[in-house]
Image: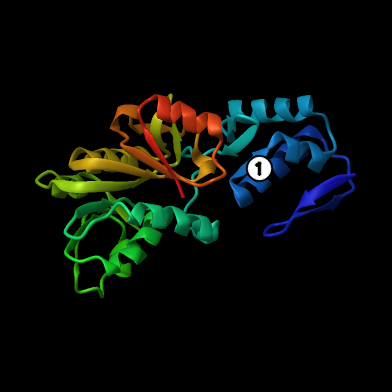
């Protein structure tokens, strides 16, 4: 008996027999809702063999619709499938836990970069209890989140506004970073792996992230488990530019070991 995924729910029964392309479209819809699926879930969901599902995932991977991972797939975040503000409501509690782990790395008096992203936004909401912090960011929502806190100074980077992503990029934003040095950078990623390092979907965003990393003494990456092991369109940091990755308890142990074998400290939220 087939099962059908409903957003925010478990699986419910699905009766119809699907053609291959229909099945792939439904897999894509599941990924857009959940960001991660396993072969086992899909086998049960569609009532087909593991070989059939793996073939579907392989073909979808070849079409840049998703990224194959050990035992499943994650949402591909290349320029054709990059998410925008729609993802802000997804996995909020998970993002908060990762943000709390990152918060423990911040000390009073630190100067920090907060990269744009929904998890770094959760981190911004926490830092009001610190004193003497200087935050450099290109994210408008992050700046607004800490605007009222008198003990936190904010340097908002100007530049070209990236529509639907509430952040700035471009040469003017990068130029503002060139004379700065910060203690720590807290970065968002679309994918993180031992092989490709940190990757993102947008070329301009990648250049902005590189500029942020270039001024930071310590570099931390906030990355939920669905983003581990894959690769997005543009690399902005190789594995040697990662001091620590902060992820959640659902991370694949093999992917964690790969990162640790490359000298990356992995912090489980």
Q: Is residue 53 left or right of residue 234?
A: right
Image quadrant where one finds the N terminus = top right
Which residue is located at x 40 percent, y 57 percent? 100
- x, y percentage for residue 132? 16, 64
Q: Is residue 230 above or below residue 144?
A: above
- x, y percentage for residue 40? 74, 36
Figure quadrant of residue 72: top right
Q: Residue furthest left?
A: 179
Residue located beneath label 1 in the image? 28
Observer-nearest of 241 and 18: 241
Which residue is located at x 62 percent, y 52 percent? 33
Where disc 1 sits, the SS reads: helix
Indicate how the structure is coloured in the image. rainbow
Residue 229 in sight in this render: no
Q: Is residue 252 left or right of residue 241?
A: right
Q: Is residue 78 left or right of residue 10?
A: left
Which residue is located at x 58 percent, y 38 percent? 74
Mark 1 surroundings: few (<14), some (14-19) or many (≥20) residues within 10 A = many
Residue 20 in sight in this render: yes
Q: Is residue 213 above or below residue 64?
A: below
- x, y percentage for residue 173? 20, 49
Figure quadrant of residue 218: top left
- x, y percentage for residue 196? 41, 27
Which residue is located at x 12 percent, y 47 percent? 180
* Number of numbered discs: 1
Observer-nearest of 93 and 5: 93
Observer-nearest of 157 and 93: 93
């Amino acid at each position: 008996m087939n099962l059908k995924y409903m957003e925010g729910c478990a699986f419910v029964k699905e009766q119809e027999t699907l053609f291959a392309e229909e099945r792939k479209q439904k897999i894509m819809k599941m990924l857009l809702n959940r960001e991660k699926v396993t072969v086992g879930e899909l086998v049960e969901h569609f009532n087909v063999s593991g070989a059939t599902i793996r073939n579907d995932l392989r073909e979808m991977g070849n079409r840049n619709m998703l990224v194959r991972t050990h035992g499943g797939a994650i949402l591909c975040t290349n320029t054709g499938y990059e998410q925008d503000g729609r993802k802000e409501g997804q996995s909020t509690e998970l993002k908060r836990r990762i943000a709390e782990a990152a918060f423990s790395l911040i000390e009073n008096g630190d100067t920090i970069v907060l990269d744009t992203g929904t998890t770094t936004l959760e981190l911004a909401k926490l830092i009001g209890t610190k004193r003497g912090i200087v935050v450099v960011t290109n994210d408008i929502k992050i700046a607004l989140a800490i605007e009222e806190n008198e003990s936190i100074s904010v340097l908002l980077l100007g530049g070209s506004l990236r529509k639907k992503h509430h952040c700035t990029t471009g040469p003017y934003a990068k130029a503002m970073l060139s004379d700065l040095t910060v203690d720590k950078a807290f970065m968002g990623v679309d994918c993180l792996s031992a092989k490709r390092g940190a990757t993102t979907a947008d070329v301009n965003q990648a250049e902005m992230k590189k500029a942020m990393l270039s001024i930071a003494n310590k570099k931390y990456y906030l990355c939920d488990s669905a983003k581990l092991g894959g690769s997005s369109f543009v690399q902005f940091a190789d594995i040697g530019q990662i001091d620590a990755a902060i992820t959640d308890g659902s991370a694949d142990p093999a992917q964690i070991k790969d990162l640790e074998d490359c000298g990356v400290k992995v912090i489980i939220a």
